[in-house]
């Protein structure tokens, strides 16, 4: 990975040809970026991973809010026409639907809507980091959309380290997934849980292990797919403008920036991004 | 935990009655603090946990150096007479034996000396974070002290999350410990490993699981014990001055500060500190 030593120039003049800005506390948001890049092949993207300060999942709400603002500002200053908080923890701590007039999308609303659409029993599970679960952001959003819903939540702090260790398909991962999942099914409820929101952008990388643990009757909701549908709907409604030109060089689609350099994260980013290859890697100074 | 909203006043005038300053990226350094508080019952301590930016273990050397300097400065400004880097990752990235003239102790040298003292086969294992292992700090120090030593290293990135999850005594923890330990014994070597350095201040909390995995013939080296011996030796040599007075109120022995507030870390700090109870909790602005 060839990180340029200096930060990007500030431009601030977004237009329809401008990129979609995506940030995460680290690399989990790459799962969202990949879905968006596939579904919007003519859009370019700027991805910012706050690797110098990750993880957000165990930090205080005040600190997460401050970091989220700094990330949004950095992306806004680099002419993003749409801002995506591809981190459930940060999403849980940002109020509002725009930043300096630029539309902001978070992970909570699209995931909640998608879950309610597929759930028949209206018993929905949510897996997330400590901070996401503690913020009750999914519970609040689901209840707002459907007051009769039952929500069962479980914090899974070991999942991100498992993905970072590359143990996505591993007996130890299966055991840990079972341990966390168990609590969702031990709870008394008239109806059985039939839908499970993967409320952290790292979790799609553990999808197979989670599906094995919950059984094939439970529908998993991945944030990236849900967000992509929401963006498509809003494009039709005119909330944001598509790039009128065709990207002739697909290799220029993704610019990648991070707040820290380390061989470990650089290699992990490459692995998670594959088969996508970013056009440029930068070091971001927030 | 009653964190005061404002930072501590800057004093900068250390004398023999001043506290010993201890920092870690988070709460692992509490394992060191507890050993020191027990061995130096008349000394008072300031503990700084950089919980807003932890963990350091996967970050770049440049970023770790910068954070380490900021933590040392904060402790120096709060009149610490001795500075202790109770974090192996940070220890691996700080050169020198003093900061602004105040003696600095890191975890690498005492742990290495203690391991060489007890090892008969001179085959020594080191467990640590990715950054500590990658920095080769233990390998360099051990080889400097004993050129004939064989060092087998293993990064264990799942250990810190396990301690934070409170799974210190758990079948899943045993499996993960076995997985990491295995590689130390698979390596070809004429002599068998007989000493294992727990090269991260979180790891003593997993001591039982690690001892089970390696067997009782392998001696575990805990950084806190080793550091404590080194401090005792240097006190006799006059490198630092003991408090001439007796602490009449043991409850005033420990002041605790962290860079972030969160219920999770506050509860974990209480658990790890027990039976010690800190006199004061502060929020530190670096």
Image (cartoon, coloured by chain):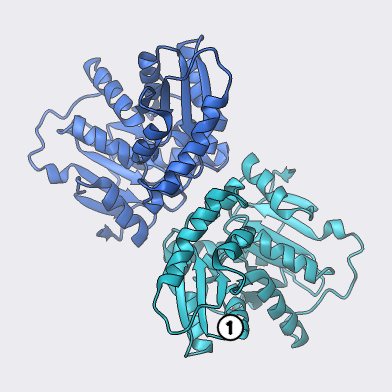
Chain colours: A cyan, B blue
Packing grade of label 1 (10 A; few <14, some 14-19, many >=20) is some
Q: Is residue A203 left or right of residue B137?
A: right
* Residue extending furthest toward the bottom: A147
Residue at left offset 40%, top offset 53%: B165
Residue A125 appears in the figure? yes
Q: Nearer the viewer, residue B214 or B219?
A: B214
- Residue B25 rendering spot, x and y as whole percentages: 42, 44
Report the front residue among B190 and B79. B190
Residue positioned 63% across, 75% down in the render: A104
Identify residue for label 1. A119
Q: Residue B198: x and y, percent?
A: 41, 31
In the shown orientation, is residue A37 left or right of residue B155? right
Q: Secondary structure at mark 1?
A: loop
Of B127 and A279, nearer the camera is B127
The quadrant holding residue B3 is bottom left
Q: Quadrant of residue A202?
A: bottom right
* Quarter placement of the C terminus of chain A: bottom right
Residue A28 % position (x, y): 62, 58
């Amino acid at each position: 990975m060839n990180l340029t030593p200096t930060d990007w120039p500030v431009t601030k003049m977004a237009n329809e040809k401008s990129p979609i800005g995506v940030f995460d506390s680290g690399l989990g948001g790459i799962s969202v970026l990949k879905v968006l890049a596939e579904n919007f092949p003519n859009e370019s993207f700027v991805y910012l991973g706050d690797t110098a300060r990750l993880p957000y999942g165990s930090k205080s709400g005040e600190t997460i809010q401050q970091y989220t603002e700094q990330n949004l500002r950095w992306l806004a200053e680099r002419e993003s026409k749409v801002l995506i908080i591809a981190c459930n923890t940060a999403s849980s701590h940002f109020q509002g639907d725009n930043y300096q007039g630029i539309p902001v999308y978070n992970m909570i609303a699209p995931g909640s809507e998608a879950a309610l659409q597929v759930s028949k029993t209206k018993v929905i599970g949510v897996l997330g980091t400590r901070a996401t679960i503690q913020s009750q952001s999914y519970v609040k959003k689901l209840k707002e959309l459907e007051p009769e819903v039952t929500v069962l939540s479980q914090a899974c702090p070991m999942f991100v380290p498992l993905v970072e260790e590359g143990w996505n398909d591993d007996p130890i991962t299966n055991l840990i997934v079972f341990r966390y999942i168990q609590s969702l099914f031990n709870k008394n409820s008239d109806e059985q849980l039939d839908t499970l929101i993967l409320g952290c952008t790292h979790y799609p990388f553990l999808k197979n292990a989670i599906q094995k643990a919950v059984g094939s009757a439970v529908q998993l909701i991945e944030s990236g797919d849900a967000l992509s549908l929401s963006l498509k709907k809003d494009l039709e409604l005119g909330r944001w403008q598509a790039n009128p030109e065709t990207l002739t060089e697909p290799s220029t689609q993704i610019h990648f920036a991070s707040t820290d350099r380390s061989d470990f994260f650089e290699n992990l980013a490459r692995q998670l991004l594959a088969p996508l290859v970013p056009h440029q890697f930068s070091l971001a100074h927030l």
